[in-house]
Amino acid sequence: MALLTPLFAFLYHLPQVYKWLLKPYYVASLFMSIAFLAVRKTPGVCDHLSTQREDGNSCDFDWREVEILMFLSAIVMMKNRRAITVEQHVGNIILFSKVANVILFFRLDIRMGLLYLTLCIGQFSLWSLNTLKFVLALIPNRNSVFAACVQDELDRDSRVTWIVEFFANWSPECQSFASVYADLSLKYNCSGLKFGKVDIGRYGEISKKYKVSASPLSKQLPSLVLFQGGKEVMRRPQVDKKGRAVSWSFTEENIIREFNLNELYQKSKKIIKTKGDKVSPSQFPPLPEEEEPEHQIKKDKK
């Protein structure tokens, strides 16, 4: 019975998994992840490749390539031990597979390595265009001005609710969550409800201003923060008094429920922007009350 329960759960959610994996980004990433395997094993192509095998068989992996692939498998297994959602598991596999492909292609031929790296950058650039970001003026070496621009955007119209993702490009969790956040922004974006992204991995002053740690050990990336009237109302994951992030699953269902997105969207899309209007608490739909972490509640009771 212990084996049948997860099996039935997987079969029940299988249509949703297929629908999610068939998105263009993941289809392209799949082909990018197996690119070296395809080149090394395709007859007519592998015959012209160099090899360090003693038997001279260029259509099979040499000992160094096997070492790199085994090391990749070990890294993916270690990273996925802490992954919670399917998106995080798949994101880790895709990320480290691409890194391994870059190393393998450069080792095989520097021209093939440069071509593959260019394709990876091109795919990332095209995918990034599908996410909604703040349009802010960037002034070199003036991070404090960039931070001020974020707050200016939040304060521009006090009737607009903002949901902002604080992320870092180097974070696998942020990369896995990007497609979920992009889908939500396209589905729920309206005149009174907007979505934004801020790269705190690049701009340290912003992370300090909004109290989101960019450290890999903090577990605060990604962070979703809801702003109403230019002020923070709630965030996920929550942070306890010691500055530790409380584990939280960044699934679409959790975000819709925790941020009350359906009701928030219905009321926000009716908002008519009028300059000079002041916001009142009654304009915003009610949000779920913030719950303190269990260990913190027990401590307070003591």
Image (tube, grey):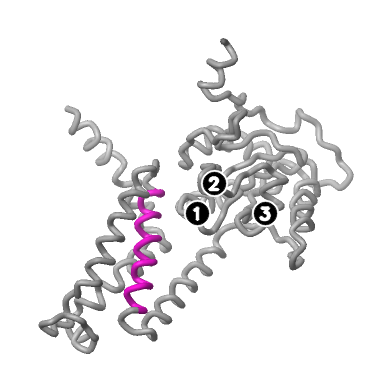
| On screen, residue 48 above or below 19 | below
Give 18 or 237, whichever is nearer the viewer: 237
**Left or right of 25 on screen, residue 150:** right
Query: Who comes first in sequence, dot 3 or dot 1?
Result: 1
Q: What amino acid does circle 3 point to?
A: Gly
**Left or right of 191 on screen, residue 175:** left
Q: Residue furthest left?
A: 55
| On screen, residue 74 above or below 28 | above
Task: Mark 3 vs mark 1: give the one in front.
Answer: 3
Task: Mark 3 vs mark 2: give the one in front.
Answer: 3
Q: What amino acid does circle 1 point to?
A: Ser
Decide whether residue 95 is among the magenta residues: yes
In three-dimensional space, the C-alpha distance between marks 2 and 1, rounded to whole angstroms, equals 7 Å
Q: Position of residue 117 (x, y in %)?
A: 43, 75
State the mark number for residue 204. Answer: 3
How many tags in the picture?
A: 3
Decide whether residue 280 is among the magenta residues: no
Question: Considering the numbered disc 3 on the image, is that residue within a helix, a strand or a loop?
Answer: helix
On the image, numbered disc 1 is attached to which residue? 171
Give 244 or 189, whichever is nearer the viewer: 244
Question: Considering the numbered disc 1 on the image, is that residue within a helix, a strand or a loop?
Answer: loop
Quadrant of residue 49 within the rendered picture: bottom left
On the image, numbered disc 2 is attached to which residue? 221
Q: Residue at x 54, y 63 (%)?
A: 128
* Pointers 2 and 1 in contact (C-beta within 8 Å): yes
